[in-house]
Image (cartoon, coloured by chain):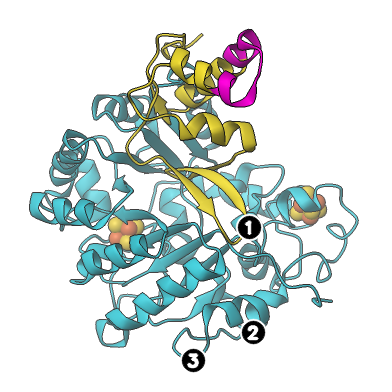
Chain colours: A yellow, B cyan
């Protein structure tokens, strides 16, 4: 167990200062940059993170993704929560 | 062999200067320190930064010596950020004040990595060879966090401070750092010279490792902890630099481009200078970078080892220092015939009274 906060629909994710999205043109790859860390992002991760602005809550992000990609809400919510929880655990995102 | 273009590097270690107010006896700088008069100009560094970004570098680490000893550090920071690089400042912090910090953050500093020498002043200042340094560092850490900026505390540990690891972790939490690096000394440069005074006992190492492991799990979401172990007691070597000429490039204060910051200790390598060749050209063709890239240079047991893509045969500099040949297997590997000697050295030296430090000073080696 650890005491990292847990992501739910009401969480409002925001990037921690020093963490930012970056389009690595040399390798044609979106990445999330953080102190001494670089996460390669797949297409879905990029779509989630482009919606992280410190204002939208997770519920709203999921709604938007569902409309844009015509996906089933329950699954999207599960995937987004798991993905964002990892980033919270790694102190890249706050909620 | 290298008909294919080499994939671009991810990181640039920009050693802006060897000047530093501190004198850490484990400093990774070479014994022959570069004088101010031989340092690259502001424009030359700007060119290096632009070329690095074009080449595909993502992270730039401004280091030294003490990078803020350069008056143009803010200008270089802004230039790096404009070029699209993620900027990291590796600093001892003692030359900083609030004004300089604000200027650097305004210029686009992404992340500040602050070294501490121990938990508390008397011993920390003794190790760093700088009175009052530790208090200044703590004050700077608080200023950084008061501004919400990303902070890493870098604690180099060894026989004379490793017992404080648990308390150092608490200190990092109290300072609200996002990341803590607990790095056992790596024995190159000045550290090699001071090895007998620094190398921990096996018992100290095991204890520190257990403390850190427990804290990593407990502090998830609060503090990221990276742990660097000393390879003298290890079974397998570290993947030095993530592979020679594979992910990183280092530029020295005078402009030499190195595959690793200690590479100059390998005496038969020839290094190109960024004032004469572009970084792109150096990365692709420089003799020093080609020498130990990939696997073709390897000998047995590395050549047919299943770990060769895990650790790339370990550290070339350590192989050269011990075996006299950089192609040899890193003696930190249990498959090296010199491995036993490394263990023995560590055990003998760590069991004796530590000799006095030979402090890092320009002209003292
Ligand atoms: S290790 Fe110590 S002496 Fe060496 S550059 Fe860093 S602060 Fe200065
Ligand atoms: S033999 Fe070479 S490749 Fe294999 S583990 Fe040892 S150093 Fe690594």
Pointer 2: residues within 10 angstroms few (<14), some, or many (20+)?
Answer: few
Against B318, residue B126 (above or below) is above
Instruction: Answer left or right for A37 relative to B331.
Output: left
Quadrant holding the N terminus of chain B: bottom right
Against A80, residue B263 (above or below) is below
**Disc 3 with disc 1 on a shared chain:** no
Instruction: Check if residue A70 falls in the magenta segment.
Output: yes
Q: Mark 1 falls within which chain?
A: A
Name the residue that disc number 2 marks.
B268
3D distance between C-alphas at marks 3 and 2: 20 Å
Residue B296 position within the rendered picture, expressed as x and y whole percent measured from the top left: 84, 70
Pointer 3: residues within 10 angstroms few (<14), some, or many (20+)?
Answer: few
The structure residue drawn at horizontal position 91% and vertical position 56%, both measured from the top left corner, is: B304
Which numbered tag is attached to residue A27?
Answer: 1
User: Label 2's element?
Assistant: loop
> Can residue B63 be seen in this snapshot?
no
Q: Nearer the viewer, mark 2 or mark 1?
A: 1
Residue B27 position within the rendered picture, expressed as x and y whole percent measured from the top left: 38, 60
Rendered-image quarter of ligand 1: bottom left
**Outermost right residue:** B304
The structure residue drawn at horizontal position 41% and vertical position 64%, both measured from the top left corner, is: B190
Q: Nearer the viewer, mark 3 or mark 1?
A: 1
Who comes first in sequence, dot 3 or dot 2? 2
Residue B320: image quadrant is bottom right
User: Label 3's element?
Assistant: loop
Label 3 C-beta lies within 8 Å of the nearest ligand 1 atom: no
Q: Toward the viewer: A34 or B324?
A: A34
Which numbered tag is attached to residue B276?
Answer: 3
Magenta region: which residues? Answer: A65-78
User: Label 1's element?
Assistant: loop
3D distance between C-alphas at marks 2 and 1: 33 Å
């Amino acid at each position: 167990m650890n005491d990292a906060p847990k992501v739910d629909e009401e969480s409002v994710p925001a990037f921690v200062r020093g963490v930012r999205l970056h389009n690595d043109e040399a390798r044609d790859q979106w990445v999330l940059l953080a102190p001494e860390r670089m996460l390669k992002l797949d297409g879905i991760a990029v779509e989630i993170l482009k919606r992280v602005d410190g204002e939208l809550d997770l519920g709203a992000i999921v709604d938007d993704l569902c409309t844009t990609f015509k996906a089933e809400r329950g699954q999207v919510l599960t995937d987004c929560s798991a993905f964002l929880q990892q980033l919270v655990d790694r102190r890249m995102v706050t909620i | 062999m290298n008909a294919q273009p080499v994939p671009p590097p991810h990181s640039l270690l920009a050693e802006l200067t060897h000047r530093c107010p501190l004198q850490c006896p484990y400093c990774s700088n070479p014994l022959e320190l570069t004088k101010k008069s031989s340092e690259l100009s502001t424009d030359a560094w700007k060119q290096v930064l632009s070329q690095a970004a074009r080449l595909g570098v993502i992270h730039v680490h401004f280091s030294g010596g003490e990078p803020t000893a350069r008056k143009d550090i803010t200008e270089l920071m802004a230039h790096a950020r404009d070029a699209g690089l993620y900027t990291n400042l590796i600093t001892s912090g003692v030359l900083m004040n609030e004004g300089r910090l604000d200027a650097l953050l305004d210029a686009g500093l992404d992340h500040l990595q602050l070294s501490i020498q121990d938990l508390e002043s008397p011993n920390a200042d003794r190790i760093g060879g700088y009175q009052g340094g530790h208090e200044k560092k703590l004050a700077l850490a608080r200023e950084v966090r008061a501004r919400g900026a990303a902070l890493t505390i870098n604690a180099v540990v060894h026989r004379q401070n490793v017992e404080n690891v648990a308390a150092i972790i608490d200190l990092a939490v109290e300072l609200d750092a996002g990341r803590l690096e607990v790095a056992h000394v790596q024995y190159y440069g000045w550290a090699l010279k001071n090895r007998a005074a620094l190398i921990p006992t096996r018992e100290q190492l095991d204890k520190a490792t257990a403390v850190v492991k427990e804290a990593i799990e407990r502090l998830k979401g609060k503090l990221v902890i990276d742990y660097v172990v000393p390879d003298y007691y290890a079974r397998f070597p570290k993947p030095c630099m993530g592979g020679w000429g594979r992910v990183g490039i280092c530029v020295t204060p005078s402009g030499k481009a190195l595959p690793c910051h200690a590479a100059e200790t390998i005496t038969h390598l020839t290094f190109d200078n960024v004032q004469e060749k572009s970084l792109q050209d150096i990365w692709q063709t420089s003799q020093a970078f080609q020498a130990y890239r990939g696997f073709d240079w390897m000998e047995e047991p590395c050549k047919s080892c299943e770990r060769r893509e895990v650790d790339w045969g370990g550290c070339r500099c350590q192989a050269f220092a011990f075996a006299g040949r950089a192609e040899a297997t890193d003696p930190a590997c249990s498959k090296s015939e010199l491995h036993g000697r490394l263990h023995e050295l560590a055990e003998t030296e760590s069991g004796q009274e530590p000799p006095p430090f030979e402090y890092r000073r320009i002209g003292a080696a």
